[in-house]
């Protein structure tokens, strides 16, 4: 059987694999955005000791290779009595890892906001919470959007590692197909193409947001 | 009849930054409905003083009263500040502020900039606030810019939006820190015109400025500061005709 017919025969598997990867990435984004915003706000607002503890935690997460983090969570949590199915263990690892990077992105975005925009909010009687909700966060999200987009693409690439803990996503699919047909090239090339397509789509979304941002912010 | 309570009353206000004294023993009463210009050389503490009035800068000691009610909190002898944040926010909502560099919220349109604080802070209904905001924008000649983002405006237009934003809060007093210093010369007039009409309308204004002609013609009172102290308080006409202190004379010449 040649490569093309293998791919044609497995088209539904690949579609499912790509959807699974997208679901993972989307789930990771939905969970890690609020988590990292909370982390960044806490780091901004907390006293020196909590701030230090958080910094250590995020620095630690960032310097662990993702594959190892996924291993530790998948094989380590059961030791603590928490048994997660592979998909959930994968999502948790991806979320934690991604959030550790997003925290830095948000912190930088917070610091980049014009002081006077925040001061104006204070002068008009905004509470701390209102200042975050109405001024700091909206501006931070707008300025950080391209970096969040890049980070999302990185998370998608990292998600391929989850195959190792048997999460059924795109790389898992490619591996499965190639093993079934004793033909590594076509299935993996297909996976590469699909990853590329999804990255380009994310970049396109980010690009659109950039155009909107420039039309407003100049 | 007793004097009416001043809109703003400052008692023995001091401010230091890291042991460096920037304001010393400031006492001042600002009657409601008047326009006061604060003049003085660079570094004399004008901005710091203005920012102490709404506690953007926390005084090291002394007190500020708005309509007889204390602004902010207490500073004890050890320099420890106790402040009720909610109360401070409520008081700040009654004090408008206009910044040298406009400080418009850049993610919001002109109209949203004007309606944001009344809706969020005063919890007024959006419909009402928008109607009122459009009326204010009309008044300052910017109704056609309501749905534009700040970056698309000229400096003069930005500052008129900033004034509108302050007015929408129906404040007891508006503080201006060099509202025209960041503007191209041809735009200074349009902003001063708005402030002049506010003065006529009886708005209480405290204005740090270097616009001498404006201070002379529009303000009721001139406060002259130098070296962190108030050196002279006088009716504007008097101050410009015959300053009493040597420093003020030198400053004016
Ligand atoms: N946040 C701060 N930290 C330390 N020193 C400060 C701070 N803000 C102001 N100062 C100092 O306080 C003094 C008064 O500053 P201020 O900005 O109030 O003067 P000003 O009269 O407004 O001057 P200008 O006309 O240049 O705006 C200056 O010596 C300044 O360096
Ligand atoms: Mg100043």
Image (cartoon, coloured by chain):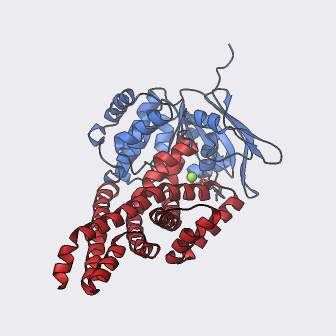
Chain colours: A red, B blue
* Nearer to us in this view, A209 or B219: A209
Residue at 29% x, 78% y is: A177
* Nearer to us in this view, A118 or B138: A118
Q: Is residue B210 visible?
A: no
Residue A94 point in image, percent of width and height = 47, 67
Ligand 1 shows up in the quarter that is bottom right
Give above or below for A150 relative to A140. below
Q: Quadrant of residue B129?
A: top left
Q: Is residue B220 left or right of residue B17?
A: left
Residue B104 point in image, percent of width and height = 43, 48
Residue A21 point in image, percent of width and height = 35, 67
Q: Is residue A7 left or right of residue A217?
A: left
Give above or below for B234 relative to A209. above
Give above or below for A199 relative to B9. below
Residue at 38% x, 69% y is: A168
Location of the C terminus of chain A (image quadrant): bottom left
Which residue in the rendered view is the most extreme toward the front? A180
Residue at 57% x, 26% y is: B32
Residue A16 point in image, percent of width and height = 29, 65
Location of the N terminus of chain A (image quadrant): bottom left
* Nearer to us in this view, A65 or B199: A65
Give above or below for B152 relative to A81. above
Residue at 29% x, 77% y is: A191
């Amino acid at each position: 059987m040649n490569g093309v017919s293998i791919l044609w025969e497995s088209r539904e598997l690949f579609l499912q694999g790509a959807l699974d990867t997208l679901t993972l990435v989307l789930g990771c984004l939905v969970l890690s955005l609020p988590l990292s915003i909370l982390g960044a706000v806490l780091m901004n607002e907390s006293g020196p000791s909590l701030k230090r503890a958080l910094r250590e935690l995020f620095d630690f997460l960032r310097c662990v290779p993702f594959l190892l983090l996924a291993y530790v969570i998948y094989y380590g949590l059961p030791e603590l009595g928490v048994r997660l199915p592979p998909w959930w263990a994968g999502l948790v690892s991806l979320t934690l890892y991604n959030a550790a990077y997003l925290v830095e992105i948000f912190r930088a975005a917070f610091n980049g906001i014009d002081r006077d925009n925040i001061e104006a909010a204070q002068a008009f009687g905004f509470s701390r919470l209102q200042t975050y909700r109405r001024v700091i966060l909206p501006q931070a999200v707008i300025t950080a959007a391209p970096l969040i987009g890049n980070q999302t693409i990185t998370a998608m690439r990292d998600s391929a590692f989850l195959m190792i803990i048997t999460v059924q996503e795109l790389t898992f699919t490619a591996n499965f197909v190639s093993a079934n047909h004793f033909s590594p090239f076509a299935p993996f090339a297909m996976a590469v193409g699909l990853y590329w397509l999804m990255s380009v789509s994310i970049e396109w979304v980010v690009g659109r947001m950039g155009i909107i941002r420039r039309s407003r912010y100049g | 009849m007793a004097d009416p309570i001043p809109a703003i009353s400052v008692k023995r206000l001091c401010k230091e930054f890291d042991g460096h004294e920037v304001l010393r023993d400031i006492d001042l009463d600002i009657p409601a409905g008047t326009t006061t210009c604060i003049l003085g050389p660079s570094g004399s503490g004008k901005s710091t003083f203005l920012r102490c009035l709404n506690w953007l800068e926390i005084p090291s000691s002394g007190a500020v009263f708005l309509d007889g009610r204390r602004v902010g909190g207490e500073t004890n002898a050890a320099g420890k500040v106790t402040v009720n944040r909610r109360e401070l926010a409520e008081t700040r909502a009654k004090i408008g502020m206009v910044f040298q560099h406009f400080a418009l919220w850049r993610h919001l349109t002109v109209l949203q900039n004007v309606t944001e604080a009344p809706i969020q802070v005063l919890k007024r209904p959006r419909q009402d606030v928008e109607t009122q905001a459009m009326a204010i924008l009309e008044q300052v000649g910017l109704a056609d810019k309501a749905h534009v983002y700040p970056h698309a405006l000229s400096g003069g237009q930005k500052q008129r939006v900033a004034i509108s934003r302050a007015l929408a809060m129906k404040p007891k007093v508006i503080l201006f820190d060099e509202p025209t210093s960041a503007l191209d010369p041809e735009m200074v007039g349009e902003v001063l015109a708005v402030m002049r009409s506010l003065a006529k309308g009886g708005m209480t204004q405290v204005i740090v400025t270097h616009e001498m002609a404006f201070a002379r013609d529009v303000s009721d009172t001139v406060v002259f500061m130098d070296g962190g102290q108030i050196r002279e308080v006088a009716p504007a006409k008097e101050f410009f005709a015959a300053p009493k202190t040597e420093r003020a004379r030198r400053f004016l010449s």
